[in-house]
Structure formats: structure tokens, C-alpha cells
Image (cartoon, rainbow, N blue to C red):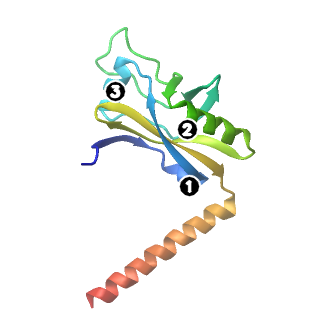
Amino acid sequence: MADEQKIVATNRSARHDYFIDKTYEAGIVLQGTEVKALRAGRAAIGEGYIYVDNNEAWLENIHIPEYAQGTWTNHAPRRRRKLLLHHTELDELMIKTREKGFTIVPLRLYFVKGRAKVEIGIGRGKKLYDKRQTLRQKQDDREAQRAMSLRRNT
């Protein structure tokens, strides 16, 4: 039986701007009002990034808006959040980010069995011609699918 995932936010531009080599699933350390705001389906991770410091991974610059019914216990919308990863995964991330051209980006923010998770990916930046080539490939695939479906229907 597959785990139910409730996707809160996706970073659609990440796969457009980066070649994603490997992905990881990480837990996030959140405050109570952040969890409630995420359950309401409100978050933006498009500008977010991840860095590793002192064997800890941190998620920076994602926006989780303040909870509407929150009081003085509300959180700061763009605060730094700690990621929960295994030591082997942290070591892999540190080694990869020391290499030239690699970065760690958040791809999706979702809930699995009631726990907030973030899918992160190690990516290499795409050049402009790579982005054009990817768009051209998608368009060609779409046209081929359309032609095959028209052929089947006639």
C-alpha cells in the first residue's frame, strides 16, 4: 500500500533551471503554527535553497505565511528551518556541493502520514541552450503523442 501524500507546494522552476541528479526526502523542524498553515495548503518554495553547515542541513528562504488564527505564538514567515537527514545523506550532500556547479534545491513540500517532508535535489545549473533544448524536446514529445492519439482514433 502506497503512502498517501498531500502535496502542499512544488518548485516547478527547479527542474527547468537545473539538471536534478539525485533526490532525497527530508523531514523539517517546524513550529505549530507553521504546520497549521501548511495543512491549509499555503506555502511558496520557488525561491528556496538548502545549505549544509556544521553537519546540519538548513532550508532557507521558503515562505510559509502566518497562520490566520494564530496569536502572539505565530512564526516568522521566512525563518530558517532545520532539515532532518541521515548522516550518510548529509555527507553526500556536503561532498556534492563542494564540487563546482552543484547546488541543493527544494523540489516539493508535502505530508506523509501526517509528517511534513520536503523533497530536495542535487542539481547542476542549466545553460540557456539546455533550457531551449528541453523545451523543444517537450514540444516534440507532445506533438508525437497528439499524432499517435489522432491515428488511433481514426
Q: How many neighbours does mark 1 have within 10 angstroms: few (below 14), some (14-19), or many (20 or more)?
A: some
Say whether marks 2 and 1 touch (CB < 8 Å). Answer: no
Q: Residue 39 appears at what percent x and percent y?
A: 30, 31
* Label 3 – label 2 distance at C-alpha: 18 Å
| Residue occupied by mark 2 | 47
Q: Residue at x 28, y 18 (%)?
A: 69
Q: Residue at x 47, y 74 (%)?
A: 141
Identity of the amino acid at label 2? Glu
Q: Answer with mark 1 or mark 3, whichever residue precedes in sequence.
A: 1
| Residue occupied by mark 1 | 16
* Label 1 – label 3 distance at C-alpha: 27 Å
Report whether 80 appears left or right of 131.
left
Q: Residue 16 appears at what percent x and percent y?
A: 56, 55
Q: Residue at x 47, y 18 (%)?
A: 76
Give the residue furthest to the top. 72
Taking depth in this image into account, of 147 and 4 the one nearest to the observer is: 4
Q: How many neighbours does mark 2 have within 10 angstroms: few (below 14), some (14-19), or many (20 or more)?
A: some
| Residue occupied by mark 3 | 37
Say whether marks 3 and 2 touch (CB < 8 Å). Answer: no
